[in-house]
Amino acid sequence: MKLTPWFKSFLAFVSLAAATVAPAALKIGFAQTGAESAWRTANSDSMKAEAAKRGIDLKFSDGQGKQENQIRALRSFIAQKVDAVVLAPLVETGWDPVLRDAKRAGIPVIITDRSIVTTDETLYACFIGSDFFEEGRMAAEWLAKKTGGTGRIVELQGTPGSAPANERRKAFAEGIASHPGLKIIDSQSGDFRRAGGKEVMEALLKKHGKSIEIVYAHNDDMALGAIQAIEEAGLKPGTDIVIVSIDAVREGVQAVVAGKINCTVECNPLFGPKVYDTVAKLLAGQKVERKSFNKDELFDATNAGAALPTRQY
Ligand code: GYE
């Protein structure tokens, strides 16, 4: 179609007018813990991809596993007058002062992924995450069934002081308490990292030798690291040592299919859409759920193969 000069200038006028009235992009600051695991990478990707899709101006900060970096990021978001702050807190405590600053500046804070402990619940708008208690409980229940309620367990803990490490540990311990034959003989932190899981497992194998019958890892990355250590010690993961883990990231589910991890409890990291829907509601003055959790499944030899092709992370 050939456009007349008049029509061309009309079109130019319309697009200029649209640009003038188009609302400014939402500015959101997201303080991420770091990049310690495959779960974390999937979580960051979800937050970034969904922001791009919605035209949100996302200020992304990688805390590199340090709370002080996250606090600094929050202060900078406040100084930049973002519309909202999203925080995935590395550890549970120590957030009140900076959250008070955000509140004073009138910036709503959404806590995502991990919960916090605070003396003032009004310091954040809402929590969007996973039920770590339920995950630990599911892992314990599966293990009790699988082993008939006996076995010597070593536990690979996540980051000390973090909600998932604290809650997965507590719920699992409570879950096995009614099975006196299941005993945690040692428990150490691998910081949710693969290298950490390998290192800790090497030390535990040296210390306890073949008396270790079960590994309970707080995430798949540490389980995958432990598998390497177990294989290097000449043992068969999944056979000589039962391995129970959490996250169900693709590599974890693949390890279940390969028979090296016996069970992994899902923890869905894809929070982007829910977080931004919630920010939009908050900014529109609508009520939001105080705490919301994703529903998680469990994968073992019975269903991992069928689930693998459609895993999103
Ligand atoms: O399980 C682990 C990650 O907070 C749920 O952190 C998250 C945990 C996840 O590093 O892999």
Image: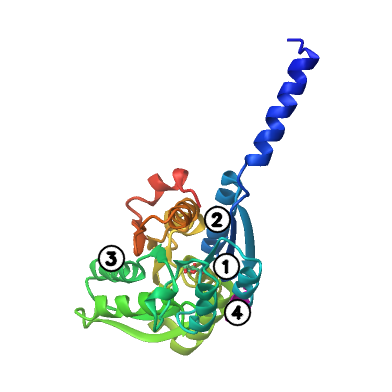
In the picture as drawn, the residue positioned furthest to the left comes out as 178
What type is the residue that disc 4 sits on? Lys
Q: Label 4: which residue?
A: 66
Q: Earlier in the sequence, mark 1 or mark 4?
A: 1
Q: Nearer the viewer, residue 57 or 8?
A: 8
Which picture quadrant has residue 151?
A: bottom left
Give the side of residue 161 with respect to residue 22, left or right. Answer: left
Q: Is residue 291 above or below residue 163?
A: above
Name which residue lies at 30% across and 76% down: 171
Q: Which residues are magenta?
A: 63-71
Q: Nearer the viewer, residue 307 or 69?
A: 69
Q: Is residue 132 above or below residue 170?
A: above
Q: Position of residue 97 (x, y in %)?
A: 52, 83
| 2 or 1: tag closer to the N-terminus | 1
**Residue position for label 3:** 142
Q: Are marks 4 and 2 in contact (CB under 8 Å)?
A: no
Q: Is residue 213 visible in this depiction of the protein? A: no
Q: Secondary structure at mark 4?
A: loop
The reply to whether the C-beta atoms of the residues labelled 2 and 1 are less than 8 Å apart is yes
Q: Does mark 1's beta carbon lie closer than 8 Å to ligand 1?
A: no
At horizontal 76% and vertical 20% (from top left) the residue drawn is: 8
> Disc 1 residue type?
Gln
